Amino acid sequence: METYYCDLIDVTPLGSFATMFFSNQEFGEVDPNFIREFGHELPVEWRIMDYRFEHHLVTYNKDEIHPLLTDGWKQMRDHFDLHKNEEIHFAYHGNGLFGITAARRFVSEDQIPNYHSRYTIGNCARFQVELTRDNIRNPYLSLWDMFAVFLRNSNVDVITACCDNGSKTDLQVAIHDNPFPVTALGPGWLNVVYGL
């Protein structure tokens, strides 16, 4: 007996997650908690369906730290008639099949899930660093003001930069006080610059 996707979509979902569709972002971000629960069974190619049983394929990068939907993600806007920026809820039905259970226009940062790279509420801190001709040529990025204070107080040795093109780079945090206070992001900085 042949199984149709519309038959599977009627089955109670195994799991779900919400994410954001931003028109200027090349990829979709997936909740790492969802990946921890179902990652072992998720294929590289996901089939996404809407209420009309229209389906579309997207590619999953198989990354547990920064799980992304890449090829096919941007085309979802036209295929499913999405708004320019939209919150989307997916239900997982097994065998790489996902249904869009809800979608609503993005109007507030409160809609962004806390795992998403654009999330800035709660325990997250948002900093802006101006890129100049000088600092994009250096192998390190000198930091000042509140970002430097934040890194000094956080007691971290490495931070991971997740760029909008989907690349990730680990940056070592360098903190020195002699002969004068310096806070910088070291080896790997040029990889971030090239990933912008």
Image (cartoon, helix red, strand yellow):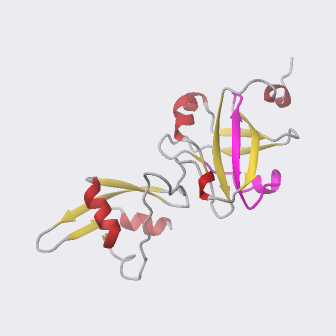
Looking at the image, which residue sits at the far top? 1
Quarter assignment of residue 182: bottom left
Whether residue 186 can be seen here: no
Is 17 situated left or right of 155 in this image? right
Can residue 183 be found in the magenta stretch?
Answer: no
- Magenta stretch containing residue 86, yes or no? yes
Q: Is residue 58 above or below residue 84?
A: above
Tell me the magenta residue range. 69-95
Measuring from the top left, give residue 108's x and y in whole percent: 64, 59
Q: Please tell me which residue is depicted at 44% across the width and 54% down the height of the picture.
A: 124
x and y percent of residue 151 in the render? 30, 60
Residue, x 74% and y 24% (percent of image)? Answer: 12
Q: In which image quadrant can residue 169 be found?
A: bottom left
Residue name at image x 69 percent, y 60 percent: 107
Q: Is residue 129 left or right of residue 187?
A: right
The quadrant of the rendering that contains the N terminus is top right
